[in-house]
Amino acid sequence: MSNLSPTPPTKLILVEEQQFLAFFNQFLLTDVGDGAAANDTIRTYRSHIKQFLRWCQSQQIHPIEASFAQLKQYRHWLVEQYQQATISLKLSVLRRFYDALLENGYILSNPAIRLKPPREVKDPAASINYLQSAEMYQLLDAMPVDDTVHSLRDRLLISVMVLEGCRTVEMHRVNVGDIVKDGENVGLRVWAKRSIRVVPLTPDLAQLLGRYLTARRKQGDPIPRSLFLWLIGPWGNG
């Protein structure tokens, strides 16, 4: 699986950060999402574990030998820097990391199994985070209506998210090849963690999509793979 060789807990060997990351990356490819984890998920998990390994290095703690008490210190360090949702994700990834070590015989038990995120204090007003109908149309009306690539892209992106209820991560992942046509009907195939759905576009949004793609072609854009993201081009940063 990796360059790591299972070593009895009584004869632990030092393993460099890159070897840990390579080992964990293989675990992600075979175990997370039943072996079909999205690339974004793998990058996120690797980033969180890389941060943990560097924290261990700063504290002179060997990751394999880390105790529950030491992991609580890591949690406290996270609390001083991140919001509750981010901390929950980082600790969840940490438990998966130790699951991988446990499954492959490097440790006898998972020291992070009881490591819970701080209890969230909920503000009822914070849950009111959606736009009212009037606010939604006010937002759309305030957007530029010219035919520049950026204006068309931004208007299409915001309109699809607001009117069709698409999430940011879905829009990040959607590609030009995910445009679905059935006669005069047009939709976008969007990807969540473990599901795929087709979001139908209204005639106005379908027309806006066509104008956006046409503007990209006129600007000399070779229509890259991503629908809403691209490399730096003649318009500046995408």
Image (cartoon, rainbow, N blue to C red):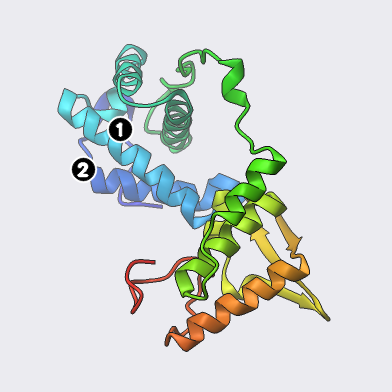
- The percent coordinates of residue 180 (x first, y second) are 72, 73
Residue position marked by numbered label 2 in the rendering: 16
Question: From this viewpoint, is residue 36 visible?
Answer: no
Of residue 10 and residue 86, the one placed in the foreground of this image is 86
Q: Quadrant of the C terminus?
A: bottom left
Q: Categorize mark 2 by other alpha carbons within 10 Å: few (<14), some (14-19), many (20+).
A: few
Count the labels in the image: 2
Outermost residue, right direction? 183
Q: Indicate which disc residue 167 carries.
A: none
Is residue 168 visible from the viewing direction of this image?
A: yes
Single out the mark in the foreground, 2 or 1: 1
Q: Position of residue 17 (x, y in %)?
A: 24, 43
Determine whether 200 is above or below 68 in the image.
Answer: below
In this rendering, position of residue 175 left or right of residue 71? right
Q: Amino acid at mark 2?
A: Glu
User: How far from the left and from the top, in percent, is residue 230?
Assistant: 42, 70
Q: CA distance from mark 2 to mark 1?
A: 13 Å
Q: Quadrant of residue 221?
A: bottom left
Query: Which residue appears at 74% of the width and 62% of the height?
Result: 198
Q: Residue at the location (48% across, 56% down)?
A: 39
Which residue corresponds to the image point at 69% horizontal and 49% vertical from the top-left? Answer: 165
- Mark 1 Cα-neighbour bin, 10 Å: few <14, some 14–19, many ≥20: many
Mark 2 vs 1: CB contact within 8 A? no
Counting from the top left corner in percent of width and height, residue 46 is at 37, 45
Q: In the rendered view, tell whether residue 72 sits above or below residue 208.
A: above
Mark 1: which secondary structure?
A: helix
Which of marks 1 and 2 precedes in the sequence?
Answer: 2
Along the line of sight, the residue nearer the viewer: 161 or 62: 161
* Residue with the mark numbered 1: 52
